[in-house]
Each structure stands twice: as C-alpha cells, then as structure tokens.
Image: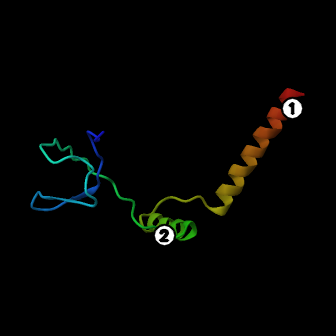
Amino acid sequence: MTPSQAVVQGTLNADGTLELKTKPDLPMGPVEVTIRSILQMPAQTEDWFSCLQRTRQELEANSYPFMTDREVTSHMEELRAEDDRVEEATR
C-alpha cells in the first residue's frame, strides 16, 4: 500500500521555490502542500558560565540596580529571622 502523506523538510527560497532535503515517498500526481516554518536552534557556542558573565555585563551596562553586599547580608538576616519565627510558632 502506498502512503497518502509524507513529511519532508526543506528550504523555502527567496523566489518562492521549495528545495526538499529528501524525496517524498508518494506516487506521482497532484499533491497539497502545507508550509510551516521550523525554528532552528542556534548552535550553542558559550557555556552557562560565559552566558552568566555576559548577561551580568549587559545588565551592568544598562545600569541594572544590583544589591550591594550590605543589602544581601541584610536580606539574608531577614530570611533567617523569619525562619526563627516559624520555628517558634510551630513549637
């Protein structure tokens, strides 16, 4: 039995023509074509740490308001105090 449909990837050229990567396994004759764009993932060229460093540099260049050491310490102390309050409430 001959298949009635085939999924084949290809490229849509600027002039509107299609270039198929493989030959469809269909009999010769009229067909209906649906074209759907496929998002291609760019090749990963940087590791996570490089990405983190680059992102930090971009944010700093845009004057992103990062917390100071004092603000981080204060925030951590507040979180720990909340933990202490929860522990006391459960006793």
- The furthest residue to the front: 1
Identify the residue under disc 2. Answer: 54
The quarter of the image holding the N terminus is top left
- The furthest residue to the right: 91
Identify the residue under disc 1. Answer: 88
Compared across the picture, whether 2 is left or right of 17 comes to right
SS type, badge 1: helix
Residue 25, how many percent across, how many down?
A: 27, 50
Nearest to the observer: residue 21 or residue 24: 24
Is tag 2's residue or tag 1's residue first in the polypeptide sequence? Answer: 2
Q: Amino acid at mark 1?
A: Glu
Nearest to the observer: residue 53 or residue 17: 17
Residue 20, how many percent across, how many down?
A: 23, 59
Q: Amino acid at mark 2?
A: Arg
Nearest to the observer: residue 52 or residue 47: 47
Q: Name which quarter of the figure residue 82 lies in.
A: top right
Q: Residue at x 80, y 33 (%)?
A: 86
Q: Residue at x 68, y 50 (%)?
A: 75
Nearest to the observer: residue 48 or residue 89: 48
Task: Establish if 9 lies above or below 86.
Answer: below
Compared across the picture, whether 88 is left or right of 75 comes to right
Task: Establish if 11 lies above or below 47.
Answer: above
Classed neighbour count for the residue bearing mark 1: other residues with Cα under 10 Å, few (<14), some (14–19), many (≥20):
few
- The furthest residue to the left: 15
